[in-house]
Image (cartoon, rainbow, N blue to C red):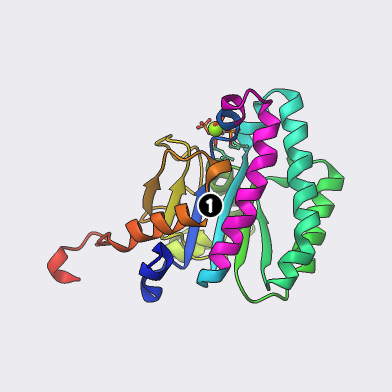
Amino acid sequence: MSKKDNLIAEKLPRHIAIIMDGNGRWAKEQGKDRLFGHYSGVESVRNIVEGSAELGIQYLTLYAFSTENWDRPKDEVSGLMELLVQTIRKEVPTLNKNNIRLHVIGNFEMLPALAQKELDDACKETEKNSGLNLVMALSYSSRWEIIEAVKNISKKIKEGKLDPENITEDTFKNYLCTATIPDPELMIRTSGEYRISNFLLYQMAYAELYFTDTLWPDFRKENLYDALLDYQNRERRFGKTSEQL
Ligand code: IPE
Ligand code: IPE
Ligand code: MG
């Protein structure tokens, strides 16, 4: 039996979030430029999107570029940005063929105007698809997102349209980039780093965390199944006791 056959459909997460890390080290291992690692990482993205769709996962969020990544060397930033935007544009027909809807979350004001438009178009061209929701986190960071939410909530209060007494978790969620997206049940990070790096801090309150040494360009469906098998053996207690579940 393959790993995939061991997965229990009813116990699959609705939403998987992935920090795709290790492209640079993967390239260095082969004596190549960091950008070569980013290009190679695209194949892993295709493979994992396909694997998630095959399993019937509803949401897959991929952390592709953080707001902090803007501080990398100029050449890497421009090369990576171009790769990301071009790839997203190029993959639209495949997304449509596979009934995948694209969403992009992040601070787009930091992106060149043309890139913003290309991303916007790609999202619109897939908006009728009802299968997997692929969420690309691009120029994203959680602290930026939370501060934006606070600013927008404050504006509403100032305008007299919101009473602070009425702010609930549901109200707050509506001001995040992920307003329409359920919280991830599983977060995977590749490349042996054990940190969150400003990704979905609020949304991951109760996510199961899975870390693997595999570098992102080597990550394939089989590695995803390993993470899912591990996830299915976890007991998610949400603060309760085992006996209460
Ligand atoms: C992940 O790989 C991709 C991005 C952060 C954009 P890295 O580029 O961080 O690769 P490492 O961590 O330096 O190996
Ligand atoms: C996190 O990776 C961001 C993405 C994968 C897009 P980084 O490589 O930027 O994170 P740190 O700097 O190691 O925490
Ligand atoms: Mg990294």
Q: Which residues are magenta?
A: 27-53
User: Residue 60 placed where, x, y %?
Assistant: 55, 60
Q: Secondary structure at mark 1?
A: loop
Q: Is residue 105 left or right of residue 117?
A: left
Q: Give above or below for 159 relative to 22.
A: below
Residue 118 image offset from top left, x and y in percent: 83, 53
Q: Nearer the viewer, residue 149 or 112?
A: 112
Q: Is residue 211 left or right of residue 163?
A: left
Q: Which residue is mark 1?
A: 220
**Quadrant of the image containing the N terminus:** bottom left
Q: Is residue 134 magenta?
A: no
Residue at 75% from the left image edge and 62% from the top image edge: 123
Report the residue that reaches farthest toward the front.
1
Queried whether the magenta region covers residue 43, the answer comes back as yes
User: 55 or 65: which is nearer to us?
Assistant: 55
User: Can you tell me which quadrant of the image ligand 2 is in?
Assistant: top right
In screen coordinates, is 40 left or right of 162?
Answer: right
Q: At x 51% / y 40%, what residue is drawn?
A: 198
Q: Is residue 119 visible?
A: yes
